[in-house]
Amino acid sequence: MSESLFPTRWANDKPPSLEKFTSDFPDDYACAEYLARKRWRSGFRCPKCGGNRAWRLEARPWVWECQGVVVDDSGTRARTACRHQTSLIAGTVMHGTHLPLRTWFLAAYLLATHSNGMSALQLQPKLGLGSYKTAWLLLHKLRRAMVDPDRRPLRGMIEIDETNVPFRRKDEPEGGGQGRSPIGKIFMIGAVEVQDGKYPARCRLQRIVNINRESLHAFIRYNTAVGSLLVTDGNTAYRRLPDRGHQAINLSAVDAPPAHEVLPWVHRLFANFKRWSYGTYHGIRDKHVDIYANEFVFRWNRRRHFQSNVDTILGLGQRIGRTTWRDIVGDTREWKAAHEDQIRDMVRPERLDRAKDYAVEHGCDIFDALDEVRRQEKRWRYVRRKPRRSALPPRRAGEERSTRRYVHPPSLAPDDIAKGYLRHVPVGSKITGARRKHPSLETQTMNSAL
């Protein structure tokens, strides 16, 4: 079939095939070579002594050990006593990982080439991971690598508006306050860069605390360039923006057109984000909405560059720095204190009663008591309800139980040992009360007997 009749969405950039990815990265050694080329574009350079000669460890291909040799342009060799080991994944999102490098590369490939993204529950069987927590943490680290810390601000004509997203699951009932009430909803602000007055380019999406002047101006100052033209609705909070043009359109008039016609691209941004979050993740929560918003912005800005998405994720992953579990989930104790009522409702009543008794007895808070009670429940031992069944067949009718005990064989006399019995027994070992003599002593005993 002709592509003119059936145009493809990858007219500008086609994503790499799975076969090509498998041939390019068959093992951890190929992945380590890729990271080495990304890190040292002009060759290896030791961070300790400046040496440019190193070898790769066979057991850990992502670790390079300096040879202590510095070769300049003229070929002069200078030797040092340096044997410093440099890890290619140190200081990156893969820092301290126990997963193979190819697992990280395959996850980045699936995340970058899948148009709608992928949840941790979908990624877990594809990577062969045994834990959902591992897949979830892996995805969140890669999502952090989707944000370029040095990205350029939006320029030119920019559409800006705010919206609210309900933080609930797909199967939960709708709720929350009306209007600008923060109950049951997340306030978000979005901006779309419009080229030539009609083509959407890059975008930004961020959560805000509330819809007031401080929140809106902080987002605009950080994400838009000086001299840009901002097109907004009639909200008075957008007024008096420094060093930026402002075009306000009153949408509350009687004959005013709908908002999605006046600001089409920013409203399409909001609609796509909400549908994407419900379709891929079945809803989002308030805690990690910024990470999911950054992933959506990454996909929007690179919706025509599938080939370079994998390189972008892995390249930014080397610049983001180390990311830990604590950086993603935050302080769990603060979260527990803020959601104490929800935690109490989720705990079984009998466990909650035991935790309360433990907290009163040991003088600790309810969260430490719940953790200790849960650990104690895991230490239980299985108690057999019925007596253990014998592996032997049941006795026949009239058969009496044997009470005879094992009888040891009779002890050997010393004369039998001296004549050569049981020569396989080592010298000095115990044999039913008798001891075997040394061969020299046995010879003397036999000669004396003769």
Image: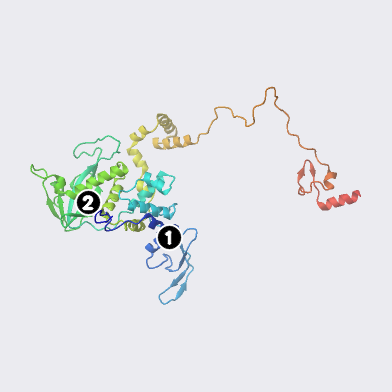
- First reached walking from the N terminus: tag 1 or tag 2: 1
**Percent from the top left, x then y, of residue 10?**
28, 56
Residue 99 marker: none
**Percent from the top left, x then y, of residue 164?**
22, 42
Q: Which residue is mark 2?
A: 219
Q: Which residue is mark 1?
A: 30
Query: Which image quadrant for residue 259?
Result: top left
Residue farthest along the left direction in this orientation: 255
Q: Say what amino acid the circle numbered 1 marks.
A: Ala
Residue 89 in view: no
**Percent from the top left, x then y, of residue 16?**
34, 57
Please name whichever residue, 394 or 61, is drawn nearer the observer in this view of the structure.
394
Tell me how far mark 1 sits from mark 2, CA to CA. 42 Å
Q: Residue placed at 84% from the left, 51% from the top?
A: 441
Label 1 residue SS: helix
Q: Is residue 33 above or below residue 127?
A: below
